[in-house]
Image (cartoon, rainbow, N blue to C red):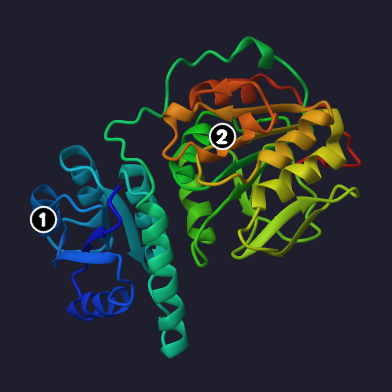
């Protein structure tokens, strides 16, 4: 795309729009091509202006951010960034399901919070501008798992995702039974303040029990664990979970999680890397594969951003590529060879 990033801003608060304009004026490569006071106006301007990136609030009159995301992606595709408060987390993730790429929280009160928000806003818009547009990306395809993944035994399975991950994870979890004989661990890059809402949103679509993990928790079969805001998660040799503040930039939540599964579960570990930008999870899949565990990635053509699966394939972490439906079918086919000392019953 061109060096200039053309941005459309949509929020029903004139104060918020003025603030966004001021913050983005500090980035010379970002050009504000229009502002909208509601989703309906955002749709009209998207049709006429064809911006590279659109920021949307989720609560707006006439047309909210969820419907606006869906209509924009159908009629005038663009890269959509949802900016909302944590109180609207469920609506924000529904907007992601409708086609938005990312969610970030509105700024905190005070000058320091505003400065941090402005820096983050510019970073996110820059990174989103590099994401290829796809108007009608299909998440699902054939429901039959690939032959190499029929059967198998796992004590724990890790799913790693970033951009585009929430809808992909939602689809996979919605297709799994409540009596899954092993736990699932998730490393999804989520904006701070949205983990609890993300967990609740996934819970509404899945029959599995979702939990925000705490250090010392002993994982249960049929449960899904996510780390708290700003934390990474791993399984310890004792069988307990450990959560700790994210280390390093960029955060490699997936590598931390998957590598721990390889160390603890060995050839009964499993892991998959889904849609996302960068290479998180690639090294973790290599660790699981070397331990003799099961590894695969989401089909790159079904990803919002194929960077992470492609990095995992290049790195030799797997040679098995599955659609999301195939992935869920594979997960259903695994039995749990569970040690009671590692994984207590419900």
When asked about the image quadrant of residue 55, the answer is bottom left
Compute the Cα span from label 2 to label 1.
34 Å
- Residue 34 on image: x %, y %: 14, 64
Circle 1 is placed at which residue position?
45
Left or right for 6, reference 163: left
When asked about the image quadrant of residue 312, the answer is top right
- SS type, badge 2: helix
Q: Earlier in the sequence, mark 2 or mark 1?
A: 1
The answer to whether residue 119 shows anywhere in this view is yes
Residue ID at (49%, 16%): 143
User: Tag count in the figure?
Assistant: 2
Residue ID at (30%, 56%): 3
Left or right for 231, reference 345: left
- Few, some or many C-alpha atoms within 10 Å of disc 1 (few <14, some 14-19, many ≥20)? many
**Number of the label disc, if any, that sits on residue 309:** 2
Q: Nearer the viewer, residue 218 or 305?
A: 305
The answer to whether residue 183 shows anywhere in this view is no
Q: Nearer the viewer, residue 252 or 153?
A: 252
| Quadrant location of the C terminus in the rendered image | top right
- Residue 269 on image: x %, y %: 78, 33
- Few, some or many C-alpha atoms within 10 Å of disc 2 (few <14, some 14-19, many ≥20)? many
């Amino acid at each position: 795309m061109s060096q200039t990033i053309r941005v459309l801003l949509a929020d029903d608060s004139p104060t918020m729009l003025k603030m966004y304009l001021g913050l983005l004026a500090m980035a010379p490569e970002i050009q504000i091509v229009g502002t909208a006071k509601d989703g309906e106006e955002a749709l009209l301007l998207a049709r006429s202006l064809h911006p590279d990136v659109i920021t949307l609030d989720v609560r707006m009159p006439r047309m909210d951010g969820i419907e606006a995301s869906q209509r924009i992606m159908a009629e005038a595709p663009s890269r959509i960034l949802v900016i909302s408060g944590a109180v609207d987390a469920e609506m924000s993730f529904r907007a992601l399901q409708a086609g938005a790429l990312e969610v970030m929280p509105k700024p905190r009160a005070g000058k320091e919070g505003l400065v941090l928000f402005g820096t983050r806003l510019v970073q996110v818009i820059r990174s989103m501008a590099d994401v290829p547009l796809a108007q009608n990306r299909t998440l699902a395809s054939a429901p039959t798992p690939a032959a190499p993944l029929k059967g198998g035994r796992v004590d724990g399975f890790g799913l790693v995702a970033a951009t585009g991950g929430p809808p992909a994870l939602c689809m996979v979890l919605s297709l799994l039974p409540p009596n899954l004989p092993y736990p699932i661990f998730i490393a999804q890059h989520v904006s701070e303040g949205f983990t609890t809402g993300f967990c609740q949103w996934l819970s509404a679509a899945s029959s599995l029990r979702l939990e925000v993990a705490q250090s010392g928790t002993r994982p249960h079969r049929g449960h899904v664990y996510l780390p708290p805001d700003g934390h990474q998660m791993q399984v310890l040799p004792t069988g307990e979970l450990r959560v700790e503040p994210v280390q390093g930039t960029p955060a490699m939540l997936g590598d931390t999680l998957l590598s721990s599964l390889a160390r603890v579960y060995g050839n009964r570990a499993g892991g998959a890397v889904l849609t996302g930008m960068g290479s998180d999870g690639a090294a973790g899949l290599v660790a699981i594969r070397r331990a003799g565990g099961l590894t695969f990635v989401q089909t790159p053509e079904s990803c919002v951003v194929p960077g992470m699966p492609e990095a995992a394939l290049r790195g030799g972490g797997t040679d098995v590529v599955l659609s999301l439906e195939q992935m869920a079918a594979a997960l259903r086919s695994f039995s749990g060879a569970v040690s009671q000392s590692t994984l207590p019953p419900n």
